[in-house]
Image (cartoon, rainbow, N blue to C red):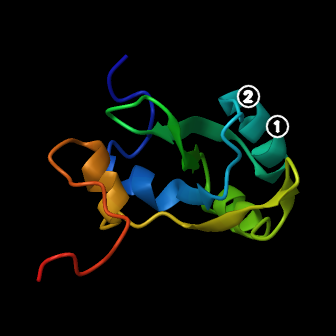
Amino acid sequence: GEGVASATGDKANTDGHSIYVGQVDYSTTPEELLSHFESCGTVERVTIVCDKFTGRPKGFAYLEFQTDEAVANALRLDGSTFKERQLKVTPKRVNDPNYYAQQGGGYGGRGRGGYR
């Protein structure tokens, strides 16, 4: 099914409906995150980001929603408690370095300014 996902057919638009979720417990499953956020609106996709090399979760995730309204609701859950941790919820920016690192070719950036 091509083009079923969005009525506009505008691929760039889907990032407008995505959020970044930080401080995610390593034992978290996509289903658990889904149930934490599904009251906000329809969740299209849950991506728990894993380290390419170890396959271990990195402690953050991206969620994609169907509407702007759902995103706005989800952002209100910033600071909400999930598995005894406070979640950090922010709009997903496409220029997020983690986003590109995930696509391959990125160096895992913990520290900034590593070149001396």
Q: Which residue does the image show at 34% across and 54% down from the upper left?
A: 99
Residue 89 in the image, given as x and y percentages of width and height: 66, 65
Q: Quadrant of residue 115?
A: bottom left
Which amino acid is tagged 2? Glu
When the figure is inspected, residue 63 is found, relative to residue 23, above or below; the finding is above
Q: Would residue 54 be found to the left or right of residue 29 on screen?
A: left
Which amino acid is tagged 1? Ser
The crowd level at tag 1 (other Cα within 10 Å; few <14, some 14-19, many 20+) is few
Find the residue positioned furthest to the top. Answer: 1
When the figure is inspected, residue 71 is found, relative to residue 48, above or below; the finding is below
The crowd level at tag 2 (other Cα within 10 Å; few <14, some 14-19, many 20+) is few
**Residue position marked by numbered label 1 in the rendering:** 35
Residue 6 in the image, given as x and y percentages of width and height: 44, 39
Q: CA distance from mark 1 to mark 2?
A: 6 Å
Residue 1 in the image, given as x and y percentages of width and height: 37, 16
**Residue position marked by numbered label 2 in the rendering:** 31
Q: Nearer the viewer, residue 28 or 99?
A: 28
When the figure is inspected, residue 92 is found, relative to residue 52, above or below; the finding is below
Q: Which residue does the image show at 79% across and 70% down from the upper left?
A: 79
Q: Would residue 63 be found to the left or right of residue 25 on screen?
A: left
Q: Which residue does the image show at 60% across and 46% down from the upper left?
A: 66
State yes or no: discs 1 and 2 in contact (Cβ < 8 Å): yes
